[in-house]
Amino acid sequence: MRPFLLKPEHQATGAGEAGLKAPRFRYLKPHSLAEALDMLGGNASGTRLLAGGQSLVPALNMRLLEPEALIDINGLGELTGITERGGALILGALTRHAELISSPLVAKFAPLLAKAAPFIAHAAIRNRGTLGGSLAHADPAAELPACAVALDAEIHLASRTGRRRVKARDFFIGIYQTVLAPGEILVAVEIPASRPGQKNVFLELARRQGDYALCGLAFTAEIKAETIADSRAVYFGIGAKPVEAQKAEAALKGKTPLDAPDAACAALAAELAPLGDFNAGADMKRHLAQVLLRRALGQLAVS
Amino acid sequence: MSGDRISIRLVINGESVAREVEPRLNLVDFLREELGLTGTRWSCEHGVCGACTVLIDGSLARGCLVFAAQLDGVRVETIEGLSRSGAIADLQAAFQLHNAVQCGFCSAGMLLSAETLLRENQAPSRADIRQYLSGNYCRCTGYHAIIDAVEEVAKARAAKGGRP
């Protein structure tokens, strides 16, 4: 949890209690997705799902949240596992960040995720934090939401009344805000099969290893006859949600990676309206976004 | 119903433990207050500093970000367990030799992270060590002494075929 979220009224004030401790809650442990959905059912506002807990528990300890109950979904088989179907990859919501680094299927069919995961916090956090949790939490400085948009992922949601799929670019709507409806659970993430000639680059600038990004870029490009036929440049840490640089993408089209940078960076600088934070102002973030695009194109040129 | 306690049975440092816990009790407080295992520190209590690092089923975890109620059936190892078994005696000696322990508050977490790094990577560079330990804060040493100690143990273990 980033410290700028801490306001005096949110700090723990429990009389006689040192430190930051979670408020009281009821602990519920469902044995199936159906049971979890029933528990979530009519009481969505007072109930939270506990997956990896690496963002939720800090928020509880700081009393940013005081849910009446936590539903511990760890161990639910319906939310676990990584499978491949015709080149598309389906990742259960409980896939841990560490699994994104170690899974041979991810390395082969969604290498962008394997490149991004080492940038998430530290080993202890990656062992528990989950893909579904990261997407549902929708921190604008997080790596995986930007990757999901860059990879054109589909997010699978379940509720008591049925299932639906939402494109990642339609899933995120603001700071910590998604289209998840009350009573819905994010169950899986589907990454479509790589397009022919697809290359992936992941870059992030942070003050220290494991910190939240000052600016990061999840980039995919289809190279045909040495030129960029299509691309997706999705930034994180600069806006309220993952920011796709569509004007820069248009400027890249039909160019080689070595010919493209100047025009693409000019388009990028014109289209981005970064939100500054205490680490970096809007101008610095706009500058860093261009630095990352140049580096990404450099990597494409030599790959 | 919010007062309901949860029954858990788990193995801590090789010993079977059964307790009934309040849902909000985190693992650090469970270890320290219920079991008297005070080697695991609580400090920032929101997952930033690494002072509460433990191993859950062999993997590094932040004790402050896990509730004891979640841990039915798992194995937890703390600094007391690794210390008693001698598994990290060489790391502990190197920390002492290099003055990598000053106030000692971060040392338990540092040692568990360092041991896990050396299990995963038998020939880490200084940059690898620095990166891996970046989730453990030390406010005394400036880190150099800690990196020196871990690097020395990595080389010594490599010379002995990777064993402590």
Image (tube, rainbow, N blue to C red):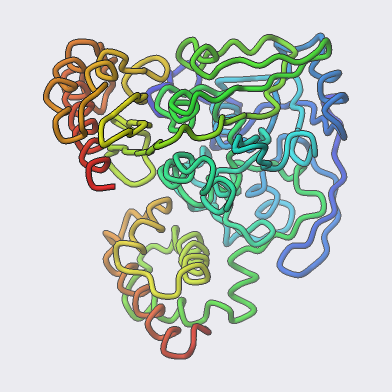
Q: How many labels were placed on the picture?
A: 0
* Of the pair A291 and A207, the residue shown nearer to us: A291
Q: Position of residue B46 (x, y in %)?
A: 51, 37
| Image quarter (top left, top right, bottom left or bottom right) of the N terminus of chain B | top right
- Please tell me whether residue A203 is drawn above or below residue A277 in the rendered image: below
Picture residue at 61% right of the left edge, 44% below the top: A128
Any part of residue A201 in sight:
yes
Q: Which residue is the extreme one toward the left?
A: A262
- Image coords of residue A144 (percent x, y): 48, 32
Residue A280, compared with residue B44, is above or below; it is above
The reply, left or right, for residue B46 in relation to residue A116 is right
Q: Nearer the viewer, residue A207 or A300?
A: A300
The answer to which image quadrant residue A289 occupies is top left
**Residue A247 vertical position relative to residue A256 in the rendered view, above or below:** above
Relative placement, left or right, of B160 versus A271 is: right
In front here: B106 or A43? A43
From what the image shows, is residue A259 above or below residue A211? above
The image position of residue A12, as x and y in percent, is 54, 26
